[in-house]
Image (spheres, rainbow, N blue to C red):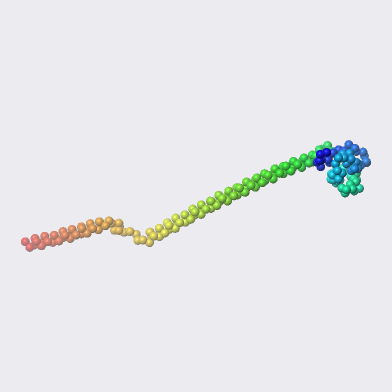
Amino acid sequence: MDIITEHEAKDKILKFLVDNREKGVPISSYRIWEQVYPDQKQQILYAVLKTLLYKDIVTSHIRSDEIRNFEVFFEATDLTEMFLNQGGFTKEFEEQQKERNEQVHIDQLNKRVLLAEVKIKEFEKSTGRKLIIWSFVLAVLSFLISVASILNGLRESASPSPSPKSFALPGDSLKQRIELFEKRLRTLEQSKNQDTTSTN
């Protein structure tokens, strides 16, 4: 026989208990093994039966719950039949599997989100560093331009303001000298002419 899954084995045992239910007559664990899973090892089946002991879906009378000396009597109730009709342990197992799969999917999505957040933060950091570097460079340039304009302003205020004469071309003073020289020359000629006129 193939290896049985626990949820299928439990449902098969519950069905056996419901089908063989007689009021007030419990069924022994040995009889369950003998009639439901005779080709399985007793201890394997008793381990499955032991998980049913503490469920409210069956009534159990325990003489020994040790796997080696397992002697328990089980009795199906109306709750057992209702539980089986609602899908039993197989439905519970499928719902748990569905929840696990959903949780795995959620975990994968969370990992993707975290990975995306990490990549975004890394991008922001690299972009932030570049922005900080450029901001620093611009601030330094702005500072240097301000210092240069202040120094230029101080240099202009320290030098005397130019007089209109300083804007005269070098040839202008020579021209003035010539004019002055010609004026003197005329004055001399006039005085000479006056001297000659007076002597005549």
Residue 154 point in image, percent of width and height: 40, 60
Seen at 16% across and 60% down, the residue is 185
Task: Locate residue 19 relative to residue 124 in the image: left or right.
Answer: right
Seen at 27% across and 56% down, the residue is 169
Snapshot quadrant of residue 188: bottom left
Residue 47 point in image, percent of width and height: 85, 45
Q: How many numbered marks have been drawn onto this rendered protein structure?
A: 0
Camera-side residue of 118 and 166:
118
Residue 76 point in image, percent of width and height: 88, 40
Task: Locate residue 128 relative to residue 188 in the image: left or right.
Answer: right
Snapshot quadrant of residue 171: bottom left
Q: Quadrant of the C terminus?
A: bottom left
Camera-side residue of 21 and 67:
67
Seen at 31% across and 59% down, the residue is 163
Camera-side residue of 170 and 23:
23
Residue 66 point in image, percent of width and height: 88, 49
Q: Quadrant of the N terminus?
A: top right
Q: Residue furthest right?
A: 24
Task: Locate residue 176 relative to residue 88 in the image: left or right.
Answer: left
Q: Is residue 62 visible?
A: no
Q: Is residue 70 visible?
A: yes
Seen at 60% across and 49% down, the residue is 121
